[in-house]
Amino acid sequence: WARVSTYVHRHLRDPSLDPARIAAAAYLSPRSLYALFAARDDTPARYVRRLRLQGATVRLRWVLKRTRRSENRQNGKRSLRHRWPMLA
C-alpha cells in the first residue's frame, strides 16, 4: 500500500494518472491493484478523486483566506464574506 499511496500523492496533478500507471509503478498487476483497493473498500479512481478534491479544497480555502485579508485591508469591514456568505 505504501508504494501505491506514495506514487499517487507524488503524481496527483498528472492528468494521465490512471490505474494502469499506478499498478506499474507499484510493481503490481492491475488486478492486484484493484484487490488492494477493494480490501480498503475503495477503488483507484475514487481514491485519486478524493485526494484531488481535498487538495482543491485546501487551495481554495487558502485563496479565500488570502482574499479576505486583502479585502479587509483595502475596504475595512466590507469583505468577501459579506458578499458571498456561502463561502464562509
Image (cartoon, helix red, strand yellow):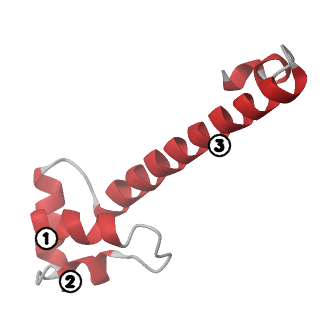
Q: Residues within 10 Å of mark 2 (few under 14, many from 20)?
A: some
On residue 36, the disc is none
Q: Residues within 10 Å of mark 1 (few under 14, many from 20)?
A: few
Say if 69 sits above or below 88 in the image.
Answer: below
81 or 12: nearer the eye? Answer: 81
The residue wearing badge 1 is 3
Left-right relation of 70 to 4: right
Q: CA distance from mark 1 to mark 3?
A: 31 Å
For the point 37% across and 62% down, which residue is it? 45
- The nearer-to-camera label among 1 and 3 is 3
Left-right relation of 53 to 73: left
- Residue 73 placement: quadrant: top right
On residue 25, the disc is 2
SS assignment at label 2: helix
On residue 63, the disc is 3
Q: Earlier in the sequence, mark 2 or mark 3?
A: 2
Q: Amino acid at mark 1?
A: Arg
